[in-house]
Amino acid sequence: MAKPVRGLRFQPSGGSRAAQIPVGKKQRLTIERLANDGRGIAFLEGRTWFVVGALAGEEVEARVLGAHGKVVEARTERVFSASDLRRPAPCAHAGRCGGCSVQHLPHNEQLALKQRMLAEQLSRVAGVEPEEWAAPLSGPEFGYRRRARVAVRWDAKAKKLEVGFRAAGSQDIVAIDECPVLVQPLQPIMSRLPAMLQRLSKPQALGHVELFSGSAIAVLLRHMAPLSAADLEILQAFCAFHEAQLWLHGEGEPQPVDPGQALGYRLEPWNLQLAYRPGDFVQVNAGVNEAMVAQALEWLAPQADERVLDLFCGLGNFALPLAQMVREVVAVEGVATMVARAAENAASNNLHNTRFFQADLSQPLSDAEWAREGFSAVLLDPPRDGAFEVVRKLASLGAKRLVYVSCNPATLARDTVELVRQGYRLKRAGILDMFPQTAHVEAMALFEAS
């Protein structure tokens, strides 16, 4: 018999703990407004609900995906009263696949949402508004994605191979036979990929598949065990049928099955060819990428006699077009393999006024040899974490103009605070619609020394 517990009993400050809402529960909600990530916000019994697929003013039935404290994450299962803005989702997998969270909004409303997100961050965090708002840079809302990672997982219990994209709010895999945002050359590969992978002899040893369409089409397979000769033959026949390169990623770095094959993409307005290997960062939207580079050059206004700094240079996406316009480009990147690849890209395009360096750009700029001569202008394209340590030292480099390309308005706004403190003013800003059908916001900002 259990011994009775005696003495004082304590409860958390603030009263008794509210019962947690179970995953899968359905709840009828009235959506008050949209969050910065495009989810609908509702309030019920002291809790805040974030609902994927809902719009302001709608009454919906939502299914709980997860709950913690007073916050509930859910997805729309049914719409009882629809917003006038709602459109039928263009994709058959909407609501299940986690990839395109705002496709129920018309494209012009998606752009307006992203514009509001950027303006709100700059106003709330940095307390500034640009002297001029640029029009959104956008392209086709479908058929734009030239790179995709396909999830592959062996379900031992069901004895079947799952192939597709991750589901919204979970690690489940949604089987995909067609993806409207993929570029057309990848569509037939995507539709036939599951059947081909199911023919392989060791499905439990398969990892993800990466698809790429650039100067060539490529299929990369991640595998955790050696492939048999029969499996390799199946893969090669599949890629030959689709006129695609086959890359394998076992131990070490990804490698092409045919060592003589090259992979890359073109920056057509500048007659540049950039080599690329699976695993390298590359912008997925080719059309918006070219428009972004063109706008960055226009805003930066580089002069022929100037020395320009490109931070987080990657493969040379900005550095090589810049090198065609100025006396010298110094390009810096944190990943050594990318530095080497960028230098090779410069050489293969006959650009000899570029210098590439590896440096940890999450740390303060110290007495780097490449920084001592100073720069007339700076371009930076950091990851989501932003570039706080870098921007703290930019004024000391003597740059009068700065173009900041951001994939996270929150860290752009944070870094803007520091740039304003150093005497820069925000001349111009605008969004880049790199990922239509999603709430992901990319932005560009021009700063000039006062």
Image: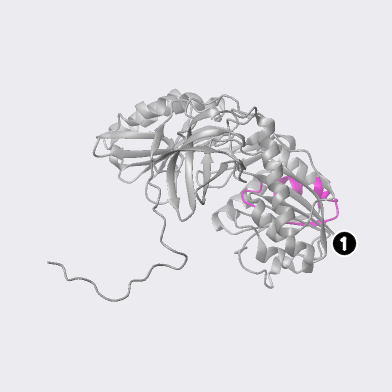
Q: Is residue 25 above or below residue 391?
A: above
In the image, the segment drawn in magenta is 299-326
- The crowding category of the residue bearing disc 1, from other C-alpha atoms within 10 Å (few below 14, some 14 to 19, many at least 20), is few
> In front: 147, or 22?
22
> In front: 66, or 133?
66
> In front: 78, or 271?
78
Q: Is residue 423 above or below residue 249?
A: below
**Residue 252, position as x, y percentages in the image:** 41, 51
In the displayed structure image, the side of residue 373 where residue 9 appears, left or right: left
Q: Residue at x 57, y 53 (%)?
A: 338
Q: Is residue 424 something one can see in this rendering?
A: yes
In the displayed structure image, the side of residue 55 where residue 350 appears, left or right: right
Quarter in which the N terminus is drawn: bottom left
> In front: 154, or 370?
154
Q: Is residue 138 magenta?
A: no
Farthest residue, direction bottom: 7
Q: Is residue 272 something one can see in this rendering?
A: no
Quadrant of residue 27 within the rendered picture: top left
The kind of residue tagged 1 is: Ser
**Residue 175, position as x, y percentages in the image:** 40, 31
Quarter in which the C terminus is drawn: bottom right
In the displayed structure image, the side of residue 191 where residue 338 appears, left or right: right
Q: Residue at x 66, y 66 (%)?
A: 389
Farthest residue, direction right: 450
Q: Is residue 322 magenta?
A: yes
The local secondary structure at tag 1 comes to: loop
| Residue position for label 1 | 450
**Residue 355, position as x, y percentages in the image:** 69, 57
Quadrant of residue 400 within the rendered picture: bottom right
